[in-house]
Amino acid sequence: MIIIRGVNVFPSEIEHHLLRVSELAPHYQLHPFLHGRLEALELHAEVTEYFYNQVGGDLQSGAAIELVRRIQSLLKTHCLISIGVRLHPPKTLPRSEGKAVRVIDRRKQENPV
């Protein structure tokens, strides 16, 4: 569990909702970080090969931006927290043998302003 601005966020709950998005591969990471003195959370998610080819490899295209908005809305509705979303090309997020590393906590690495 991750606590962001007093909200309990369960990676398994986020995963449950992400698996409903057909344009996403089942590989993602959550990056909690400090934005000034406030905690924030960013989702790094891989798109499927099909979607990546459909947008011509341009993850800044209108379709990709619409996908980001859809994911943000889905997570805000079900997890009750605003989460930033960054899309990645297929097979670019690190893979691990055994248990997947889903949370990369950067809150302690950064100094608040």
Image (tube, rainbow, N blue to C red):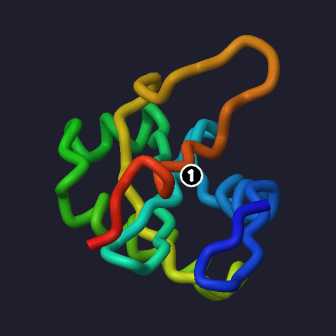
In the picture, measured across the screen, residue 87 lies left or right of residue 100, that is left
- Say which of 69 and 109 sits in front: 109
The residue pinned by badge 1 equals 30
Q: Residue furthest top?
A: 97
Residue under the point 37% across and 49% down: 87
Amino acid type assigned to the residue bearing label 1 in the image: Leu
Asked if 57 appears above or below 108 in the picture, the reply is above
Residue under the point 31% across and 75% down: 36
Residue under the point 70% across and 71% down: 3
Q: Quadrant of residue 9?
A: bottom right
Residue 101: percent from the left, percent from the top?
67, 33
Residue 64: percent from the left, percent from the top?
30, 59
Asked if 9 appears above or below 6 in the picture, the reply is above
In the picture, measured across the screen, residue 63 lies left or right of residue 49, that is left
Q: If the image is split into quadrants, where does the C terminus sit?
A: bottom left
The answer to whether any part of residue 23 appears in the image is no
Q: If the image is split into quadrants, where does the N terminus sit?
A: bottom right
Residue 8: percent from the left, percent from the top?
76, 76
Badge 1 density bin: few <14, some 14–19, many ≥20, Cα 10 Å: many
